[in-house]
Image: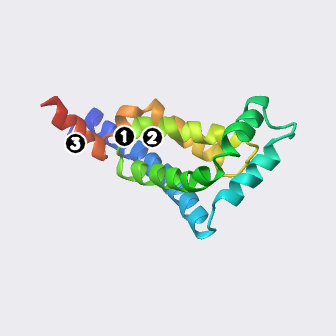
Amino acid sequence: MTRSRAAARISSGAVGAVRVALGILWLLEGILKYRAEFGAADIELVVESAVGNSRVPGYFGWFADAVMEPLRGLFGVAIPAIETFLGIALIVGLLTIPVAIASVGTLLLYWSADQLIAQYPIMLALSAVVLLFSRASREYAVDRYIWRGRAR
């Protein structure tokens, strides 16, 4: 094996480890919410804290009041399901790039709601690594076999 090929494998393994670490963090977020029986009441708290909060951008205050409030039951079910899906998909490497984009979008949604959790900046950085090194992030992933099969 040449040096460049070995370096490529090491970098692919490192980026794959970043992808898996991000997946584990999302999976833990989803499991935590399931264990806490996250639901409509939790969404109601988010809506109440967003409306009139000077740290929450106006667009999110409107979204919380006009969309989340009437659909709080749906959001209460969807949020832990989305987090769990993001985690599993990232761990196995399924739809890596769209899922990493969804990871960034979900984190931005949480920040807009003034939900500031310590690991979210780390999760954003890990998402950025997966996106910046997208080819390497798929090397040790289900995506690799999907795309390889489509190329034939």
**Residue type, numbered disc 1:** Leu
Residue farthest to the bottom, as pictured: 35
Secondary element at image label 3: helix
Which mark is first along the chain, 2 or 3? 2
Residue farthest to the front, as pictured: 70
**Residue type, numbered disc 3:** Tyr
Q: Which mark is residue 67?
A: none
Residue lying at 63% horizontally and 62% vertically, measured from the top left? 38
Q: CA distance from mark 2 to mark 1?
A: 6 Å
Q: Are marks 2 and 1 in contact (CB under 8 Å)?
A: yes
Q: Judge left or right: residue 115 versus residue 83.
A: right
Instruction: List x then y, in percent, for residue 117.
Output: 70, 51
Instruction: List x then y, in percent, for residue 115.
Output: 73, 48
Question: Which residue in the structure is indicated by mark 1?
Answer: 95
Judge whether 117 appears above or below 111 on screen.
below
Residue lying at 36% horizontally and 36% vertically, measured from the top left? 136
Q: Which mark is residue 145?
A: 3
Q: Judge left or right: residue 92 versus residue 144.
A: right
Q: Residues within 10 Å of mark 3 (few under 14, many from 20)?
A: some
Q: CA distance from mark 3 to mark 2?
A: 17 Å
Q: Which callout, 3 or 2, points to the residue nearer the camera?
A: 2
Instruction: List x then y, in percent, for residue 84.
Output: 49, 56
Q: Are marks 3 and 2 in contact (CB under 8 Å)?
A: no
Instruction: List x then y, in percent, for residue 51.
Output: 82, 41
